[in-house]
Amino acid sequence: MRKVIATASKVDEIIDRHNKDDSHLIQILLEIQREYNWLPKEALLWLGERLGVSINQIYQIATFYKAFSLVPRGRHLVRVCTGTACHVRGAIRLLDRTTQVLGIEPGENSRDMRFSLETVNCLGCCAIGPALVIDEETLGNPSAAELEEALSSRG
């Protein structure tokens, strides 16, 4: 019960910053995600009630945009590009190296919830591929040592 109350209270703060304006729904969802690192169901239900928006509409938006997650994610999001340009430059090797270092497969979280690993179709930085992004840091064709350093430096 305390978790639901705490969630509602935090979501209320976010909604109030946007003056309960349902045209700010995407921005509100982004802020909820930033707060929890995912979109908890309780938060979405409360958001719908407060804004007078159906839960279906909220889920349509939350599932349309790749930026949103409906399941818990690790503190650090690692996204490996497997698009065409990165693929021909060694994306599969980079993905294999990343899964080895993290000990998880794409779509999984590390046991300590430190990392989540995803593959994406394009990061928009084809010239430096194969590429991956750790949180907001983009790495192009990192060596094994650079990859390990970039991952281990995140607490």
Image (cartoon, rainbow, N blue to C red):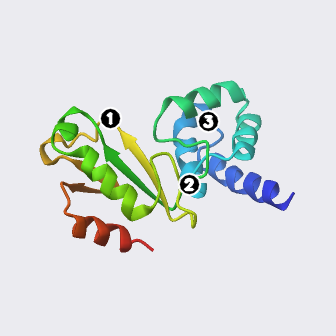
Please state which amino acid type lies under the numbered disc 1. Answer: Asn
Q: Secondary structure at mark 1?
A: loop
Residue at the image position 19 percent from the left and 45 percent from the top: 90
Q: Residue at x 61, y 52 (%)?
A: 72
Image location (x, y in percent) of residue 142? 20, 60
Residue kind at label 3, given as amino acid type: Asp
Badge 2 vs badge 3, beta-carbon distance below 8 Å: no
- Determine the residue positioned at 68% across, 47% down: 40
Which of labels 2 and 3 is toward the front? 2
**Label 2 CA crowd tier, 10 Å (few <14, some 14–19, many 20+):** many
Classify residue 75 as left or right of residue 89. right
Label 1 neighbourhood size at 10 Å, few (<14), some (14-19), many (20+)?
some
Cα–Cα gap, marks 1 and 3: 33 Å
Q: Which residue is mark 2?
A: 37
Q: Nearer the viewer, residue 49 or 40?
A: 40
Q: Amino acid at mark 2?
A: Asn
Which label is found at residue 73? none
Which badge, 1 or 3, comes first in the chain's sequence? 3
Farthest-out residue, left: 127
Name the residue that disc number 3 marks.
Answer: 21
